[in-house]
Image (cartoon, grey):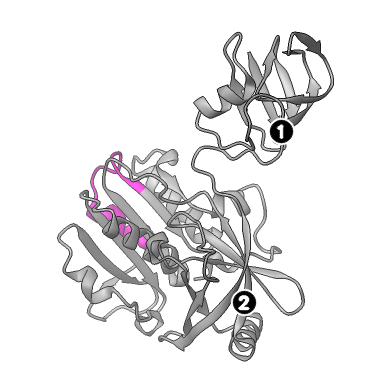
């Protein structure tokens, strides 16, 4: 039987005579639970459609306890708090601003520290929301990796008034209220094959997190970083760049689009990738930048033989292709 969960939309394949909670756990879901015998009611859910058997009684509506309820047909439950495999719960934290320093290219490296005893949980490549003085929230990729514990790192491009105001707020208040984690373009599991990381501007923050995760977990496959900017002076300092250059399986490419004649590569990011790979089919690709940049890269690589499912980017979720980007106020996680 199939049990559909609201509001997550997850669908569980439940065997005959199997309790709903047991099926969810077998399939890798994290669920509210405690006693496992129907006494504590922690696992309670609301039966919206279908029939279940619970303690020998058939139910077709109302509250049930997933640890002892067995579906008799396809069902729909409202069961909040269930996390998909690999999904982490969103938490709100009040963080200390440890540092806020300019690192070139009008970019500021912001270091936050979560409270003692409350280490943030996130996957490399995810992002957070930071609360502004007006109550609105702005999204920024986490440049840190989970092994850094309480310390969170952000790269903020300080050119627009909204970003400059936020930087001033962080420096003056010395604290920041954040929510995390968000985003599906992460490395909860390392791929079995080469990685290609494509970043425009401060999209590098997400790739910084992915590279540090690969480094800490001993990833053996090749990792190719393509970091793009309009001008050479738009690149900014990264704390581990010199260490990265010594890694035998990490290949660093800086690509400038608007000013040729410098010592590095010139052109568009997807052009550089296509120059380096005659066959794209084995690659696991992550991209971070503006929607126009990400979709142009996707189209160019698909035209060269890549399957679209090989690329992961947060843009696909927050700015789907059917939406016109001209009039959108986009999250800063993909500023370039």
Judged by depth in the image, the label closer to the viewer, 1 or 2, is: 1
Residue indicated by mark 2: 176
The answer to whether mark 1 and mark 2 are in CB contact below 8 A is no
Mark 1 or mark 2: name the one nearer the start of the chain. 1
Checking the image for residue 40, the label placed there is: 1
Span highlighted in magenta in the image? 269-284
86 to 295, vertically: above or below = above
Where residue 299 sits in the image (x, y, percent)? Answer: 45, 48
Front-lying residue, 272 or 286: 286
Identify the residue at image location x=62%, y=58%: 91
16 to 179, vertically: above or below = above
Where residue 257 sits in the image (x, y, percent)? Answer: 38, 72
330 to 37, vertically: above or below = below
Where residue 177 sits in the image (x, y, percent)? Answer: 65, 72
Identify the residue at image location x=52%, y=65%: 117
Task: Point out the image quarter for the N terminus.
Answer: top right
Would residue 237 appear left or right of 319 to someone viewing this image? left
In space, the residues marked 1 and 2 are separated at their CA atoms by 37 Å
The answer to whether residue 319 of the structure is visible from this angle is no
Indicate the secondary structure of the residue bearing disc 2: strand
Where residue 16 sits in the image (x, y, percent)? Answer: 60, 8
Front-lying residue, 101 or 50: 50
Using a 10 Å C-alpha cutoff, classify the residue at mark 1 as few (fewer than 14 neighbours), some (14 to 19) or many (20 or more).
few
Q: Does the magenta stretch include residue 282?
A: yes
Would residue 190 appear left or right of 35 to someone viewing this image? left
Q: Does the magenta stretch include residue 6?
A: no
Using a 10 Å C-alpha cutoff, classify the residue at mark 2 as few (fewer than 14 neighbours), some (14 to 19) or many (20 or more).
many
Give the number of callouts. 2
Checking the image for residue 197, the label placed there is: none
Identify the residue at image location x=59%, y=40%: 83
Front-lying residue, 244 or 313: 244
The answer to whether residue 207 of the structure is visible from this angle is yes
């Amino acid at each position: 039987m199939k049990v559909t969960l609201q509001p997550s939309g997850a669908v569980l394949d439940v065997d005959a005579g199997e309790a709903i909670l047991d099926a969810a756990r077998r399939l890798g879901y994290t669920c509210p639970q405690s006693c496992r015998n129907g006494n504590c009611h922690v696992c309670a859910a609301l039966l919206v459609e279908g029939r279940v058997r619970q303690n020998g009684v058939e139910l077709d509506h109302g509250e049930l306890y997933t640890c002892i309820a067995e579906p008799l047909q396809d069902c729909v439950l409202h069961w909040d708090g269930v996390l998909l495999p690999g999904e982490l719960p969103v938490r709100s934290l009040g963080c200390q601003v440890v540092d806020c320093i300019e690192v070139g290219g009008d970019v500021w490296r912001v270091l936050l520290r979560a409270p003692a005893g409350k280490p943030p949980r996130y996957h490399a490549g995810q992002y957070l929301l930071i609360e502004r003085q007006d109550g609105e929230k702005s999204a920024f990729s986490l440049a840190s990796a989970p092994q850094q514990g309480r310390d969170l790192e952000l790269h903020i491009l300080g050119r627009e008034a909204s970003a400059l105001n936020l930087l001033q707020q962080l420096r003056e208040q010395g604290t920041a209220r954040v929510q995390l984690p968000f985003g599906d373009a992460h490395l909860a599991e390392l791929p079995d094959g080469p990685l290609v990381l494509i970043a425009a501007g401060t999209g590098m923050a997400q790739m910084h997190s992915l590279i540090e995760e690969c480094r800490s977990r001993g990833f053996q496959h090749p990792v190719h970083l393509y970091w793009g900017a309009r001008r050479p002076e738009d690149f900014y300092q990264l704390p581990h760049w010199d260490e990265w250059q010594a890694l035998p399986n990490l290949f660093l490419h800086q690509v400038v689009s608007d000013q040729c004649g410098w010592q590095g590569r010139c052109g568009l990011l997807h052009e550089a990738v296509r120059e380096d790979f005659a066959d794209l089919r084995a690659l696991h690709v992550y991209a971070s930048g503006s929607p126009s940049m990400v979709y142009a890269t996707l189209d160019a690589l698909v035209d060269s033989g890549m399957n679209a499912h090989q690329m992961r980017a947060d843009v696909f979720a927050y700015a789907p292709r059917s939406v016109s980007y001209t009039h959108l106020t986009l999250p800063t996680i993909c500023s370039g």
